[in-house]
Image (cartoon, helix red, strand yellow):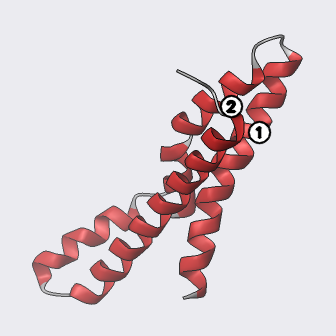
Amino acid sequence: MAQVILTFFVAYGIVVGGSISGGIGAFLTDKPPLLSMFQLATQLKIFGIVGALGGTFDSFLQIEKILMGNFSPVLKQMVMIVVAFWGAHIGTICVHWLVQVRS
């Protein structure tokens, strides 16, 4: 359970922290910071997922084990992938809510 919570918050932190840092960079380069944060939150979602899963594709390789009949590691990895996705998605929603850019 601790690993699941850690995975969620790592994905969340990558998206939120990257967006805020990018917004500061946009401010320093005379670009609109809120719009940059909005766009970065969407773009960083995949990096939040991959970063939370350890930066490798071992999680996706575990899916191959389903053919061998070993479901336990596959189920654990699927839970971790879903939790990482939710962490990144909630981070994106929080940044979008924070900046409130109107399309």
Mark 2 closeness class: few <14, some 14–19, many ≥20 residues within 10 Å? many
**Image quadrant assignment for residue 28:** top right
* Mark number, residue 42: none
Instruction: Please name the residue shown 13% across and 86% down the image.
Output: 69
Pointers 2 and 1 in contact (C-beta within 8 Å)? yes
Sequence-first disc among 2 and 1: 1
Q: Nearer the viewer, residue 12 or 64?
A: 12
**Rendered residue at 33%/72% (across/down):** 78
**Residue linked to disc 2:** 37
Q: CA distance from mark 2 to mark 1?
A: 6 Å
Judged from the image, the secondary structure of the residue bearing numbered disc 2 is helix
Identify whether 20 is placed above or below 87. Answer: above
Q: Give residue 51's quadrant in the image.
A: bottom right
Instruction: Give the x, y percent position of residue 17.
Output: 74, 47
67 or 96: nearer the eye? 96
Amino acid residing under circle 1: Ile
In the image, 81 versus 95, the foreground residue is 95
Does residue 60 appear left or right of residue 93 in this picture?
Answer: left
* Label 1 packing within 10 angstroms: few (<14), some (14-19), many (20+): many
Which residue is labeled 1 in the image? 20
Quadrant of the image containing the N terminus: bottom right
Q: As displayed, is residue 21 above or below residue 94? A: above
**Residue 103 horizontal/vertical position (percent):** 52, 21
Query: Where's residue 8, x and y in %?
Result: 57, 68
Using the rendered view, name the quadrant where residue 64 is placed.
bottom left
Tell me the residue at 77%/29% (across/down): 23
> Residue 63 location, x and y as percent?
24, 70
The residue shown at (38%, 75%) is: 79
Mark 2: amino acid: Met
